[in-house]
Image: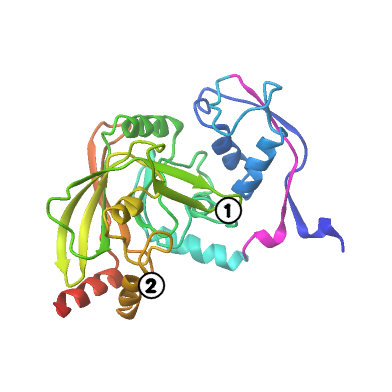
Amino acid sequence: MNIKSEEKVINQSVKMLSISEDEAGQRIDNYLLAKLKGVPKSLIYRILRKGEVRVNKGRVKPEYKLQQGDCVRVPPVRVSEKEQPPISNKLNKVNQLEKQILFEDDCLLVLNKPSGLAVHGGSGLSFGVIEALRALRPDARFLELVHRLDRDTSGILLVAKKRSALRHLHEQLREKTVQKDYLALVRGVWQSHCKVVQAPLLKNEFSSGERIVKVSEQGKPSETRFSIEERYAGATLVKASPITGRTHQIRVHTQYVGHPIALDDKYGDKEFDQQMTELGLNRLFLHAFSIRFEHPKTGETLRINAPLDESMKGILKQLRNAD
C-alpha cells in the first residue's frame, strides 16, 4: 500500500517564522493550531513533545508564551486524509453556523454554539467551531477562541477577530469581570440554601485525550454560584454562574452536591438520564445562555443572550405539565 497517497501535506518544508508584536503573548500550541490549519491537536502536542518545534533553537512546552521577535521552527507535517471529513459534511456545518451568529463586528464574533460540535479539531475530531468559522470567514486574518465550551454544551462562545481584542477579553476573564450564566437541568430538588459551591477541581487527562475532573484537595480553587429557575417533580432547572473557569466545572460541582446534570455521560446518573431520554432529551442539558462583558474597542457593556432551543424548551414544558 502506498502510505503517502493517504496523507495530506499541511506544511511541506521546515519554516522559520518570526513572531510579530500582534502575535506575541499567545501560547505556542494555540499559535501552531492557527498556522497549521487542519492538523489535529494531538499531532500539535506530539511535535512539541518530540522537540520538532523549536523557539530560538530550543525546546518549549505547549504553554510557552511567545515573545515579539521569537524565531519559531515549524517542521513538515502530514495528516491522514481519512481524518478529514467529507467536504459536504464541512459545508453543512459551516452553513448551519452562519445562522447561529448572535453578534459580529470588526473586533469579535459571538456564536450560539450547537451541542455536539467541538470548539477545536483534535482528540480524534478534525473539524470544530474554529475551523468552521475560518471556512465561513476566509478573508479574516485572525480568528481565535476567547474561551471554551465543552463539546456537548451549547450556547454563547466568544471569538476574537483581532489580537488586541483577544488580549483585552482575556484580561477581563482574569479580572473576573466577565459574567457568564448557564442553564442546567439537574436531578432532584435543589435546596434553596445551596447558592455557592466552592470545591477544588483536579483534572486528569488520559493518553486517549479523554478528560475526567474530580473534587480533590490537590485541585485548583473553583467556585460556582447557583440559583433556582424552576422546580419540577424529580428535577430542577438551575442557573449556574461560574466565577472560575475550570474544565467541566459546572458539571462536577452539580454532581458534587448530589444533583448531576441530565444526560451527562461522564458525571451523570443513569436512572435520571433514562427518565429524561424517555421524554425525548438526547443531549447534555447545559446551555450558556447569557454573557456580559466590556467591548474591547468601545468600552460599552454588552449583554448577549442565547435562548434555549425548541427541543430543550419542549422538555421543560413536558416536565411542567407532569407536575
Q: In which quarter of the image is residue 3?
A: bottom right
Which residue appears at 29% of the width and 79% of the height?
279
SS at mark 1? Answer: loop
How far separated are the C-alphas under marks 2 and 1?
23 Å
Residue 215 position (above or below residue 236): above
Q: In which quarter of the image is the N terminus?
A: bottom right
Residue under label 2, please give it.
282
Task: Name the residue tied to disc 1.
Answer: 123
**What sort of colour scheme is used for the picture?**
rainbow
Three-letter amino acid code at disc 2?
Asn
Where disc 2 sits, the SS reads loop
Residue lying at the far front of the rendered structure: 217
Q: What residue sits 31% from the left and 32% below the top? A: 172
Of all residues, the one furthest to the right in this rendering is: 1
Mark 1: give few (<14), some (14-19) or many (20+) Cα within 10 Å.
some
Identified at 47% across, 51% down, the residue is 212
Q: In the image, is residue 74 part of the stretch drawn in magenta? A: yes
| Residues shaded magenta | 69-85
In this picture, residue 34 sits left or right of residue 319: right
What is the x, y in percent for residue 232? 16, 70
Q: In this view, does 58 lie above or below 238?
A: above
Instruction: Give how far across and how far down residue 106 sits, in percent.
Output: 39, 39
Query: Considering only vertical position in the picture, is 205 above or below 272?
Result: above
